[in-house]
Amino acid sequence: MSMLTRTIIGLLLLLALVFIAAGCRQQTAVQPEPVFPNGSQSVAADDPTLKAPEPPPAPPKPPVGPEKPPVQETPKITPKKGSLKPPTEAEIDAARKAGTQHAVIKTAHGDIEVELYGKETPLTVANFVKLIKVKFYDGLIFHRVLTDPGFSIAQGGDPDGTGNGGPGYQIKREISPNLKHVAGALAMARSTDPDSAGSQFYICREAIPKLDKEYAVFGKVTKGLDVAKKIQPKDKMISIRMK
């Protein structure tokens, strides 16, 4: 065997040993972890391991107690027709003994303060005070306002707002010779029947002497006559309260 042949055989044996060694190293190498935890090489639509974790539940809100109900305006309670009665003898006597009483008529233009003469007109004052105490006048309008020269009045107290309404009863006319239709006089309105007054009243915005001895004057404006002169038809009486 020549030297060249022996050299070639040696090289072939050396290459064979290299390939054998490389194959052994490949078998003993650590296999890489699969891409997916379940070992599959494709994405599974229903694989729970692929879903994003759910966020933790929100902490409970601290207790704040019951909600405060909205503020509601107290509705006006209007007495039913027929439920009101004329003043009793005891109420008339109380008005007489009380003498002069005071009330405030509240309007959008301001307040009108009046005094009521229970000693001279106990029936009429007792009736007016009784209606005030049940808030009969609250929200009613001045339905009749006249500005004629020598005859300027503001009249209200009709629950119907027409001039034909009243409390459901009538009282007798009560005339005192000491009470005149001066500027600021407070008097009861009525129909042609002298004893037909009920709840309607008027304020004289100037002296009207021709009404003396015909209509029952029972009070007078002590403060706010200028307010009374500003009243227009359908202006509201916000309220009337005793002082």
Image: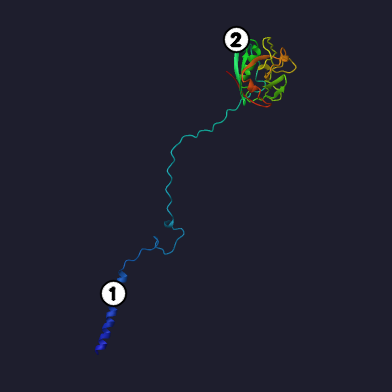
In the image, residue 41 above or below residue 10: above
Q: Earlier in the sequence, mark 2 or mark 1?
A: 1
Residue 104: give x, y in percent of width and height. 60, 20
In the image, residue 211 above or below residue 5: above
Residue 105: give x, y in percent of width and height. 62, 21
Residue 164 appears in the figure = no
Which residue is nearer to you in this view: 241 or 149?
149
Work out how far the residue at label 2 is from the one at label 1, CA to CA, in angstroms: 134 Å
For the point 60% across and 14% down, the residue is: 101
- Taking the image as shown, residue 43 lies to the left or right of residue 233, namely left
Residue 72: give x, y in percent of width and height. 56, 31
User: Pointers 2 and 1 in contact (CB under 8 A)?
Assistant: no
In this rendering, the label closer to the viewer, 2 or 1: 2
Q: Quadrant of the C terminus?
A: top right
Residue 218 appears in the figure = yes
Q: Which residue is mark 1?
A: 21
SS under mark 1: helix
Q: Which residue is mark 2?
A: 97
Q: Quadrant of the N terminus?
A: bottom left
Amino acid on which disc 1 is placed: Ala
For the point 29% across and 76% down, the residue is: 20
Which residue is nearer to you in this view: 113 or 84?
113
